[in-house]
Amino acid sequence: MDAADEITLTGVRAFGYHGVYADEKRDGQEFVVDAALAISLRRAAETDDVADTVHYGELAERIVALVEGEPVDLLETLAQRIADDVLTDERVASVRITVHKPQAPIPVPFGDVAVTVRRSRA
């Protein structure tokens, strides 16, 4: 495995109903997801065939489906769900998922809140 190879997808936006408060589950809000996949890109580079890599368009669609899917209380749970999905592709050695909640119900001015999980097959 070429440990230095990586596919990075940042800023995937989707509307979801996640949060611990009833109004978050009722009204929903936008979430932003970043994903970094450790994967050997050698075969894809040799063949120039998208079938030999993770198709980042399809990855983005799967992330959106998960964010728009069943509500959870915690960003940690949502990030884990996305990481688990990414790791169903056996070519992915590890993944780093960050879920941002820019409109989180925090009573003081803030720029962003995010949770990052790192998961690997090993």
Image: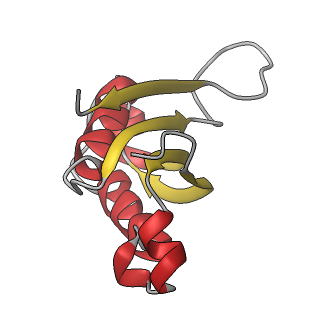
User: On screen, 101 above or below 17?
Assistant: above
Q: Is residue 28 visible?
A: no
50 or 117, nearer to the observer:
50
Determine if residue 9 is in view: yes
Q: Quadrant of the N terminus?
A: top left
User: Percent x, y for residue 64?
Assistant: 41, 62
Q: Position of residue 41 (x, y in %)?
A: 49, 62
Q: Residue at x 58, y 29 (%)?
A: 104
Tell me what residue is drawn at x 46 percent, y 74 percent. Answer: 44
Expressed as whole percent of the image width and height from the top left, the position of residue 29 reads 51, 47
Task: Give the farthest residue toward the top.
Answer: 108
The relative height of residue 74 versus residue 45 in the rendered view (above or below) is above
Q: Which residue is painted at 33% across and 36% down in the image?
A: 78
Would residue 60 appear left or right of 83 to someone viewing this image? right
At 36% from the left and 45% from the top, the residue drawn is 17
- In the visual, does 82 lie left or right of 31? left
- By what rule are the colours in the image chosen? secondary structure
Percent coordinates x, y for residue 18 in the rendering: 36, 38
State which quadrant residue 58 falls in: bottom left
Q: Nearer the viewer, residue 66 or 4?
A: 4
Q: Residue 24's image quarter? A: top left
| Quadrant in the picture for the C terminus | top left
Circle count: 0
